[in-house]
Image (cartoon, grey):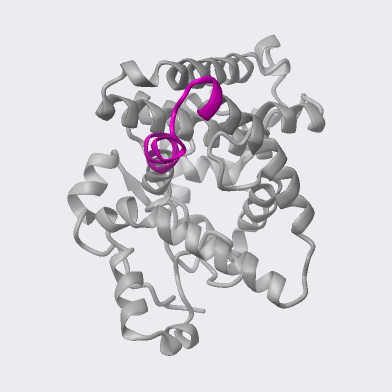
Amino acid sequence: MTTLARTLSSNAAAAPRWWRRCEAPTWVLAIFVYLAWAALVLAHAAVPGVLLFVLGGCIGQLHASLQHEAIHAMRRIPKLVRWALVWPPLNLWLPYPLYHRSHSAHHVNFHLTHPQKDSESVYHSAAAWDGYGPVQRAVIAANQTLAFRLIGGPCLCLGNMLRAELGRLAAGDFSHVGIWLVHALSAAPVLWYVTRVSGMGLGEYLLCFVYPGMMLGALRSFTEHRWDDSPHERVAIVESNAVFGLLFLNNNLHHVHHRCPTMPWYEMPGYFHRNRRAVLEANGNFYYSGYGQIARRYLWRPIFRPVHPHW
């Protein structure tokens, strides 16, 4: 057993403190996110546009991070309560059950980066690449740069989801229809509060909350994974700072998350700092000191070729 695996095992066996047993930090954060969202939407007319864009995006990303946390951690809270805590679709575009299903598939570590089996892979198979036209190839290649991923990535993500869902319907598969109907009903109170109570236009909400939230998500996931023969060396560590650590609920320490996915977000930084050497040895030193370093390297330069080198 490796040093990292032994430490993970001992960490899991340790008696949890009271605040872990009741998931107090996550409850506090969830209450803050919903109150901050409600207040910012209500006061949107008094907030300068740039600040609204920044704060709205941060709230959107924090809520997405909470949804991710509910998939993996919070195990001492009943599933129904976990789902209810993160269910309101503040980001509008993705039904939580579909996110839960696809992200759970992503965590089959052996399949990480596989173009078909990893739901979050940005690689393409050689056969698929050969079938693309020049425009599609150019867009996919541009998507390997951070600048394009931030600006155009959200649109690509929405387009891919829409194409997949329409393709499912065209093939006679109606298994997601119920999920989308429930999602529409769940989004109705959000839209009622945004447009009726707060008087905010839907377009403004999409521009100042949904879009920047997706941009932050694209930043976090930009270099989380790469191909390597060893599954553990396919997962990065981005150390970053407390601001991004909170926005991403420390999922930027991504290798730690993949090795111990049920570890709560508030325990990950301490674990990483105590076991830094073992973690970086296990992931082949796939490491960045922060998102500034990533931007300097890959803002305009592709991070890797989009054709998968193995599959």
Rendered residue at 28%/67% (across/down): 142
* Residue 101 x %, y %: 70, 53
Along the line of sight, the residue nearer the viewer: 13 or 269: 269
Q: Nearer the viewer, residue 189 or 69?
A: 189
Rendering quarter of residue 43: top left
Span shown in magenta: 195-212
The one nearer the camera, 129 or 153, is 153
Height in image: 277 above or below 107? above
Q: Quadrant of residue 292?
A: top left
Asked whether residue 12 is drawn in magenta, I would say: no
Looking at the image, which residue is at 20% across and 62% down?
A: 301
- The residue lying at 61 percent from left, 63 percent from top is 110
Percent x, y for residue 168?
69, 70
Instruction: Determine whether 264 is above or below 27 in the image.
Output: below
The answer to whether residue 2 is above or below residue 168 is above
Q: Report the residue that reaches farthest toward the top.
A: 18
Q: Main secondary structure of the magenta part?
A: helix
Q: Is residue 48 above or below residue 226?
A: above
Q: Position of residue 272 (x, y in %)?
A: 46, 32
In the rendered image, is residue 267 in sight? no
Q: Is residue 265 visible?
A: yes
**Residue 300: % across, % down:** 19, 59
Q: In the image, is 286 to the left or to the right of 282?
A: left
Magenta highlight on residue 202: yes
Residue drawn at 46 percent across, 17 percent down: 42
Give the total of numbered labels: 0
